[in-house]
Image (spheres, rainbow, N blue to C red):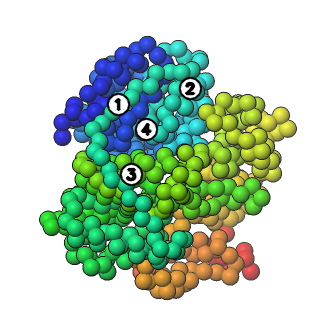
Amino acid sequence: MDYRKLPVYEQRERILEALKDNQVIVVESPTGSGKTTQLPVILHEAGYAAKGIIGVTQPRRIAALSVSEFIAKQLNVQLGTLVGYKMRFEDKTDFSTKIKIMTDGILLQEMKLDPMMMRYDVMIVDEAHERSLNIDFILGLLKRVLEARPEFKVIISSATINADIFSSYFGDCPVVKIDTITYPVTLVYDPPSIENNTDILMEKITEIVERTVTGKRSGDILIFLPGEKAIKDCIALLSLSKVKDKLHIIPLYARLGKDEQERVFELAPEGKVKVVVSTNIAETSVTIDGITTVIDSGLAKLNFYNPKTFTSSLIEVPISKASANQRKGRAGRTAPGYCYRLYTREDFEGRALFTMEEIYRTDLSEVVLRMAELGITDFERFDFISKPGRSGIIGAIEILNLLDALNPDRTLSNVGTMMCAFPLLPRLSRMIVESMLKYPDVLEEVLIAASFLSTQSPYVLPPGEEIEARSAHHAFRDRNGDFVSYLKLFTAFVRSGNKTKFCETNYLDERTMLEIVRIKEQLELIVHDQGMVIKSGGPVEHYLS
């Protein structure tokens, strides 16, 4: 691959010229143009790493790893030297690292010790269009750094989704728009005969796939569905279709490991059509060449917080017009294509223009706690790119007061200071602190429970094997509640000799179970750093009888 022919690299002079005269620029270009991988290389070649580090934030762990591997290969260096990455549990950098790819959360952690980011000369905020809560908070903090450090530079990297909002936020800074060659996409509105019926929806998708393959249309197929279960159900039905022998089906969702996700970039075997069945991760975060047919369910799952119950839930919602158009664009990157929308034109016209930003639909207590940690106490006046409602901030303060994390003047209490040591949601870090202060004899059990609660569920329900899976899961259930079930499962997993076989037998996601173990190990290190000895209560019946 000739990296110099990527659209972003070809426009490097425009980018550098804009950055020379401005502290902040926005680079707007479509998915697949090379924004993520080439911007750090362009800056490195131009000498921006001579004194400090070129930082790049990524919203996803897998992206941070794959991007750093790509750039290291391009520059012909060993990963972890000139080019490195850092994320929770992993730090692949050394004293010589000049291009550092990190998750959003890691940058926020670093800013606790270095609020003015003195080690960095440039920070690239990638995938800014996703507008996650972390991204919005980082943008607000970077604005403060820019005021204090005139020499500091920021590049906001965005797909073609409302990029002008970033320019307005940073004082009408320049927007460098980089176009790529696109091909026409024929749009077809083809809703199923019955709305809101998953079975009928899957049958409609199968029908379109069969029609596309038997019609000998060239190119691969990308199907957008709202979640993992829908993806597995769709794959199960496609595996029984009339054209099953001609399909090379690949799932794509966040829970998959790096190797499994990278299967989407492989060519289909000779004589077969690649069918990628994906969540909205394939809208802008992943570039898959060769797609000429997109089937769009028009649905996605978003996280919504309920302040009455203090809980968050993934809710299936209609996607915005911007998301729908991003999905359509996936079909026209390499050749003319088709996009089948499984909803009506009237439905599309009535949808929101953009996806609701996370700051309007999530619990703000973690961000408010991090503000207090940074010495920011006027929470309501913090300069977010999109102002959260006052009720959201007040609700977060109320939660933190219930957790005894704040003093009356909104500074961190002793409990709040202890909580901030843990990279967890406030209620989980408070649980650990409570055990440290009052129940040290069961601290290990509390760390295990917090580890389970800070990641996704390890239980899997493969289509067609739901009964067997539930039976296997039930073996770890306990009448004393979920926490005791977690303890039993964790102990059995750690003691198992062949962990892969253990997970297969008990219908568990091995990657998630290993992550839970790593989280516990990290939490143990933090507890040790605070001078605590980790004790266990021993057998459950000793303290729950």
Which residue bears the numbered disc 4? 160
Secondary structure at numbered mark 1:
loop
Which of the 4 image quarters holds residue 539?
A: bottom right
Which residue bears the numbered disc 2? 168
Q: Tell which of 383 and 453 is nearer to you.
A: 383
Q: Does residue 292 appear anywhere in the picture?
A: yes
Q: The N terminus lies in which quarter of the figure?
A: top left
Q: Amino acid at mark 4?
A: Thr
Q: Residue at x 34, y 69 (%)?
A: 208
If you read the primary sequence from the N terminus, does the residue marked by circle 4 or circle 1 appear first?
A: 4
Distance Cα–Cα, label 3 vs label 4: 13 Å
Distance Cα–Cα, label 2 vs label 1: 19 Å
Which residue bears the numbered disc 3? 328
Q: Position of residue 321 (x, y in %)?
A: 50, 49
Q: Are marks 2 and 3 in contact (CB under 8 Å)?
A: no
Q: Position of residue 22 (x, y in %)?
A: 46, 16
Which residue bears the numbered disc 1? 178
Secondary structure at numbered mark 2:
helix
If you read the primary sequence from the N terminus, does the residue marked by circle 4 or circle 2 appear first?
A: 4
Eyeballing the image, is 517 above or below 410? below
Q: Amino acid at mark 2?
A: Ser
Q: Amino acid at mark 1?
A: Ile
User: 10 Å neighbourhood of mark 2: few (<14), some, or many (≥20)?
Assistant: few
Q: Are marks 4 and 1 in contact (CB under 8 Å)?
A: no
Q: Position of residue 409 (x, y in %)?
A: 83, 34
User: 10 Å neighbourhood of mark 3: few (<14), some, or many (≥20)?
Assistant: many
